[in-house]
Image (tube, rainbow, N blue to C red):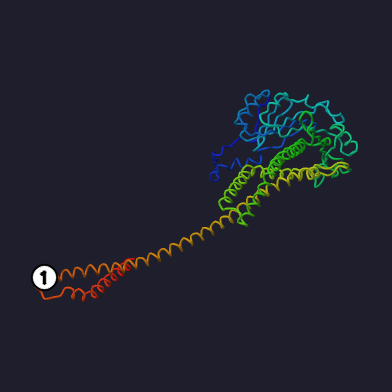
Amino acid sequence: MQSATSSQEFVGLNSVQTHGFLPLDDPHRMALHNEVHARPPARIRLPALITFLAVLNQGVSRQQECDHLSELPGQAPLKIEQMQGNFVRLRLNGFSVKWERHTEFTSYAIVQPMPAQAVLGIAEPDLLSALAVPADWLARIPGRTVAAVQLTMLTAPLDDATSLMAQAITWLGERSLVASLMGSNALSANELRPQTPDRHGYGHPIGHSWAVTQFQVRADGFERMLVIAPEGTSQTRAGRIAGRLLELETYRLMALRGLPVAKTLGPMLAKAEADLVQITAQLENKSASDQELLDTLVSLAVSVERATAENVYRFSATQAYYALVNQRIKELREKAIPGTQTIGEFMQRRLSPAMATVAATEQRLISLSERVARTSDLLRTRVDIVTEVQNQQLLEKLTRGQELQLRLQSTVEGLSIAAISYYVISLLLYGGKALKAAGLPINPEMVAGALVPVVLWTVWRTTQKIHAKLKVAH
């Protein structure tokens, strides 16, 4: 029994390699270099049965997956360190199990020889009874199923399309089929060699294999795909064909995970857009107070931003998965088989509208967020203008108050000059009376009356000097 092998030796990010002729390696150099070898295609000997399962791995640790793989016969020594590269192929007695961990999902592919009862021409053969791993082991894989495919790869000549299609219909069942002739253009002589040879020993550009499916989930929970390739198809080509088809279906389903989100957001976006129209109308007509509009607008902005934060990753992932689907379809280099639509045509008709809905919802959410921001700017401008008007009115009131205060101050200063002059003259009068009592021949009242203008001018002049000093000090 062979032990588990990984596609690449795990290189820690903190390790630094040294070479005699090079500077020190960047800590990420080896990990980045080996990334292109992270998931090598399988070598599949035809005919073969591939049982493929993709499960969402949210909340599922790598240790849980390692423990589950260790339950397979002879895999108890499997260590989690061997799974750090996100790819492990386990070679067991007569079959292999491939484990791959991605960002959102983990895939398991069980590759085994084709059961004898499932040859081409048999009507809907039972495949689960011939599964190489225990059925309960498959059911206990940690995670939630997102894709389950039974991919059967058989060999048969491709020259009689009518007979071949009849056998495919019998094998898959009387349902609508989607079929493609793969590898039908830009093929090299080496790639064409497995096809119908001409007198020079080379094939004609008719494609290297058929892919037939229904894109329907059966009662056992699996989809079925049928690949028919001619005798002599290489193991590496069979591995690439299987990898493209399984990735195509997995990425299709992962891309569609954005569709329920888009449908759920539809009513919320419609209500938010209607609320924004109402807020804008009230803002234009000034039919509501600024505080009421601000409270409503803040509540709307919060709900829109929450929806954006919760779903921006899902929308971005949908576009990324959809791009991968289109890439895999392009790699199939498919050609139509008379009477059926190709996988690419099926995706264009069925998947593209869903992706357009997701893209439109994403753009609608972005547009709504921008419109809310513009409305907020308008409301803020309105509030700023009202505030400036209020500030101007307040300044005018303060100016009028200061003018009144200056007038009052001038009046008080005039009264103060009169009062001070009165007290000074009173003091002079008392002084004159004292001198008269002392025997001097003076008339105190006459002297005080004569000094009134002098005292008034002196007090006024002294007040002016004090004002002048205060102005200089400021």
Residue at x 22% of width, y 69% of height: 424
The answer to whether residue 458 is visible is yes
Quadrant location of the N terminus in the rendered image: top right
Residue 134 position in % (x across, y down): 72, 23
Quadrant location of the C terminus in the rendered image: bottom left
- Residue placed most toward the observer, 81 or 139: 139
Tell me the kind of residue under disc 1. Ala
Pointer 1: what residue?
A: 437
Residue 466 position in % (x across, y down): 28, 68
Say which quarter of the image contains residue 170: top right
Say which quarter of the image contains residue 322: top right
Where 41 sits versus 92, above or below? below
How many numbered marks appear?
1
Residue at x 68% of width, y 23% of height: 73
- Residue placed most toward the observer, 423 or 273: 423
Q: In this view, does 458 lie to the left or right of 300?
A: left
Secondary structure beneath disc 1?
helix
Crowdedness near tag 1: few (<14), some (14–19) or many (≥20) residues, C-alpha within 10 Å: few
Residue 196 position in % (x across, y down): 87, 40
Extreme left residue here?
Answer: 439
The answer to whether residue 202 is visible is no
Q: In this view, does 384 lie to the left or right of 8?
A: left
- Residue placed most toward the observer, 404 or 166: 404
Residue 175 position in % (x across, y down): 85, 35
